[in-house]
Structures are given as C-alpha cells and as structure tokens.
Amino acid sequence: MSKKTNRSSRRQFLGAVSAGSAAALAPMFIPASALGRDGHVAPSERVIVGGIGIGRRGGYDLSCFLPQKDVQFVAVADIKEKRRGEVKNIIDKHYGNEKCETYRDFREVLDRSDIDAVLIATGPNWHATAAMTAAKAGKDMYCEKPVTKNISQSLILADTMRRAGRVFQAGTQRRNLPHFAFACELARTGKLGKLQKVYAHPAGMQALMSGWLIPETEPDKDVVDWDMYLGPAAWRPFNKKLLDGFNFEKGGGFVGAFNGGGVLEWGSHCVDLCQWAVDDCLPPVEYNAPKDGELMARYENGTQLIFREKGWIPLGSCPVRFEGETGWVEAGDSGKMVLSSPELLAGRDVEEIGGYPATFHVRDFLDCVKTRSQPKGNAQAACNAHIACHAANIALFLGRQVNFDNATNSFINDEEANRMRSEALREPWRL
C-alpha cells in the first residue's frame, strides 16, 4: 500500500471517530497530540523515521531530526548492541516512552510498512548499498556522505533513486546555508563574469590502499555483528581499530575497503559546492596529477576545478573560492563571505550562520518528503560531485592525467583507470 493511501486511511479513521462515534466515545480522553492540537502535528501528517547506523555523526543528525514536530522516530538498527541501546535511550527519553524498537539487521527496519523514511549514518562502506536497498523498499532517505565509494556506485545510486521515485538527501548540509548558497548563486548566474576557476579545499589529498590489520578475537554476533559491519566490503579478520574507524580516519580504503579515498571525505562537501557553482553540470572531463599542492581538473567548457590542500583567507573549514572574469568570492564554515567588491551584494543582507549546522538541511529533506520534490542534496547532484572526487582520486593514485567521457562514463583509452571505476562486492550485497 502506498504512503498516500496509508495517510488517507488514517485521516478517514480519525474523521469517522470524531464525526460518527462522538456520542459513544464522549467519555474517552483523546490527547491533543492525536488530534494535531496545541502545537502538535496530527499523526496523519507526521514523517515516521527509522535510523540505520547512528554513531557519532549519526547522533548529531538524530539531534536535528528529533526536535522537528512532524517527525516520529520509531526504530534504530545497528551492528553494535551497546550503540543500539544508547540510541534507543535517547529517542525514548525525547518522547517520554519506551517505544523505540531496536534491530541488528537494518533490513528489518526497511520491512516495516509504517516507516516512511530512514536516516543512514553508517560508515561510508555501507552508504550506497543501504540507500539503494532502502529505495527498493519504498523508503525516502537522508544519507550521510560520502554517499558512494566509486564512480560505478555513484551512477547506480542516481539511477536507482530516479527509477524508484524516492526522495534522497545527501548529508551535504552546506547547500542549505545562506552564505554558501549566495556565493554559488553569484557564480552560477554570471555575477562574477564568465566563470574561470572554482577552488575546493579537500583538507588533504591521499589515495591509500586498504589495510589488513592483525586479527583479533571476534565478538559474539549479538554484541558486534562483524560480518554485517563488513557488508559489501572485501572480507578481512576482525580488528577493533577497523571497527572504530581507524581506516577511515587515516584516509585509507581507496578501492575495495571502507571509504572512497582521501579527497572524498571533505571533497564531498567542498567539491559539491563547486558543482553547485557551475550549475550542477556534468563532472570535469580532465584530471591532472597534483602539482605544487594543487590538482587541476577541467570542465568541458574550460572552467577549471582546482583541488587545493591549503586554504586562502581564514574563513574556517571547508573553504571554497569562485573566480570569474570580473570578480571573485570566498566562503567558509565561519559563516562569512569575502567578496572582490561590495557591489556584488547588491543591497542584500546575507545571514551568517557558522558551524555548518544540519538542521536546515534536515528540514529541507522533510519538506521534500511531503511535497515529493527534489531536495538541495539530491542524488543526481551527489552523483556528479562524487564522480569528480573519485576521478581526482584516480589521477592522484596513478600520478598522471586521466580523461573522462561523460557520455560513456568511462576514461578515454585508459584500461588502468577504468578498472578503478568499480569494485567487487561481497555476496549478497551486489547492486
């Protein structure tokens, strides 16, 4: 049964209770929350949400979801028993009940017909697979980034969301912050003149192969489900450092491991903003090996995307810079912008919101779940930005130029680079 049908039946039920059975039910107390009164949202208008892998970053996302009055968080799945309990306690405490259900296998959350959407905040290894499994189960999703581990996954993800008609929001929350949005608007609308260069600051450029640490005693499956943690990644023996993000923090896992390489972690934010500045066009077609701390990529129209290890004006983390023929703009996580000319503001007052909060991004997602429109960090936008990062990682790893054909989604006459577009996935997690 579709979500629309479910909500219609709930409205009809409430209408029947209030109109047809008023006399019989007169003595019964009905809470204001059930009727959408006193600031509450009626059950028929709430978005019912489940969580998948709510760890450190996911805990922050959860804190942005719970205050939304039209959200009801009802379930959490995690491979760690301790974390399942911790997240359940947070949710139950917020609602003043003990109704949050816990699961070890995220597919049990997806099997629930009452759940409309899921928050996916696992490690990067799981993002794309969990998102596509959720889409096939008819769920909308807010998915943390990086959302894919390679070029192939990026293309399949965008295609899956398009065919399934699901609302997908990548955790690229800077798209919903005023100063970043305004900076991108200046570039996109020609206010800087013909756009020449867009700069991304990925906070380091590494492309390491996956590690294989010393085997340790594997915990009981109910305590930590190691096999489920590995999921689609190549098998390796249990080691707590891998479980706690050691591989991720070191930038490892270029192909066949737990994430998509060093450029991708911050790149999926700052390159995503550069993609927005060039009007979300297709990814660059040329990627060069780093030189003097910069990796230059070139779009088909000649605009350069430059990955730069060091920032410029101190505007906080994740700085971006857009240069046109007549002007430039920089923005960063401080919430501030610097412009080549105050005239670029054209009398507009751009709100400064520092610290890159995700609340506005979560609200954008929830609104789109209700209207069935495309959120700011939609799957196609995420696909293009991630392909740019993956291709840059390949040039970085090979130490030479690679040329990408957006028509065939392959590298031109380059078998070595093309082998890195995808990876083998463990059964049963093939896409």
Image: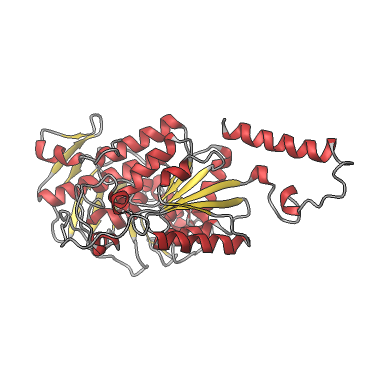
Residue for point 48% across, 41% down: 140
Residue 113, percent across and down?
Answer: 54, 38
Residue 301 visible? The answer is no
* Observer-nearest of 365 and 274: 365
Q: Height in image: 422 above or below 212?
A: above
Quadrant into which the C terminus falls: top left
Which of the two residues, 135 or 409, is positioned nearer the viewer here?
Answer: 135
Q: Residue furthest right?
A: 23
Residue placed farthest to the bottom in the image?
A: 314
> Which percent across, then down, holds residue 99?
58, 55
From this viewpoint, which residue is outermost toward the front?
220
Residue at left offset 26%, top offset 52%: 259
Expressed as whole percent of the image width and height from the top left, the position of residue 279 reads: 38, 42
* Quadrant housing residue 337: bottom left
Q: Which quadrant does the N terminus fall into?
A: top right
Left or right, residue 185 beside residue 242: right
| Number of disc labels | 0
Can you give x and y, in whole percent of width and height, for residue 105 in the image? 40, 47
For the residue pair 144 and 27, the one nearer the viewer reads as 27
> Which one is nearer the viewer's eye here, 179 or 333?
333
Tell me the residue at 36%/36% (across/down).
Answer: 158
Answer with the quarter of the image where residue 232 lies: top left
Residue 250 shows up from this direction:
yes
